[in-house]
Image (cartoon, grey):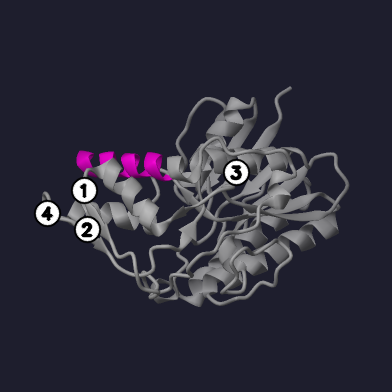
Amino acid sequence: MAYRALVTGAAGSIGVVVVDELVGRGFEVDAWDIAEPPARSGVTATEVDLRRPVPLGLVRPYRLVIHLASVTENRDDRSSLLDHLSSLSMTAHLLDSLAEQVPGAVVTTSSQLVYKTGQQHPAEENRMAATTGFAAAKIASEAFLEAFGNRSQVPTAVFRLANIIGPTTRRGVVHDFVRRAGEAAAGRTVRITGAAQHRRSFLNLVDCATAVIELADALPGSAPGHQVFNVANFDSVSIAELADIIATATGTPFEVETRGERLAWRGDPGTVLPATARLAATGWRPRSTSREAVHQAAEGMWASRARR
């Protein structure tokens, strides 16, 4: 008999890939989202608003529950604390709905943005800091999941995502650079100012999905406990290299300021590369480098612009 998994936030860019990967591994999947996820073979797609209690009868016995649903806007100037409180309510409503039919394991995605600012290589045990409403909601959701695991005696895990990108990504530096290339007049150069030596780790959507699934699928049957993993690529590219990759993908010339220490944009944290030793120790490996992930995402975003 095939195992069954529940994925919340299943219509999101990560959720769609996670569902596809689970089906490819032989799972039957319940896919929940506030916008009804795409229906396909092996998937039961249901429109579920987790800001409200889950209707009785929707929950079934699951080997895995992968909780992705949340408010994804991480900038305080574009969201309110009330917006992020709804993320926490999504987590609470989901976990309460699982109380009667406890699954084999429950995992959720969090963010590298929960860490105290200014750290170059934050590890999972580093101190967290609620510097934004987004970070506060992620920290609280992590705590709620750990409390559920303690109460229900099932293994739980949190995956703190770094820069996850793909053709459907609609925010972040790669999307911003592609957008600027699209807005530039033919033959005009896009100028990037600020400290271009800072580095980022980029992980593509498929690699992110496989990390989440493989780490989650190792939990059922293990001793109850709570684990935290940074999920990021094992290498990185600089802002200058990123601009060069996107110039190649779009055919738009970029000029990058090679001197200066001013950060490239408001809120830019500089170089922050999450420690990945704990992730590497599981045996999981990404299939694409950061450079390959950026190039694939930029090509997809550029092609998407051309079709509009």
Residue 11 within the magenta-colored segment of the rendering = no
Q: CA distance from mark 2 to mark 1?
A: 7 Å
Q: Which residue is drawn at the image coordinates 60% and 43% (left, top)?
A: 7
Mark 1 against mark 3, which lies toward the viewer?
1
Compared with 157, 82 (above or below) is: below
- Residue named by callout 3: 7
Compared with 172, 116 (above or below) is: below
Q: CA distance from mark 2 to mark 3?
A: 40 Å
- Residue named by callout 1: 252
Q: Which residue is drawn at the image coordinates 54% and 64% (left, top)?
A: 272
Q: Which residue is drawn at the image coordinates 84% and 59% (left, top)?
A: 151
**Dot 3: element:** strand
Given the image, on which type of amino acid does mark 2 rest?
A: Val
Q: CA distance from mark 2 to mark 4?
A: 9 Å
Given contact means CB atoms under 8 Å apart, are the residues at marks 2 and 1 in contact? yes
Mark 2 against mark 3, which lies toward the viewer?
2
Q: CA distance from mark 1 to mark 3?
A: 38 Å
Mark 2 against mark 4, which lies toward the viewer?
2
Question: Which mark is first along the chain, 4 or 1?
Answer: 4
- Residue named by callout 4: 185
Compared with 54, 196 (above or below) is: below
- Residue named by callout 2: 190
Residue 295 within the magenta-colored segment of the rendering = yes
Given the image, on which type of amino acid does mark 3 rest?
A: Val
Q: Residue furthest left?
A: 186
Given contact means CB atoms under 8 Å apart, are the residues at marks 3 and 4 in contact? no
Which segment is the magenta one? 294-308
Q: Give residue 192's position: percent from left, percent from top.
A: 28, 63
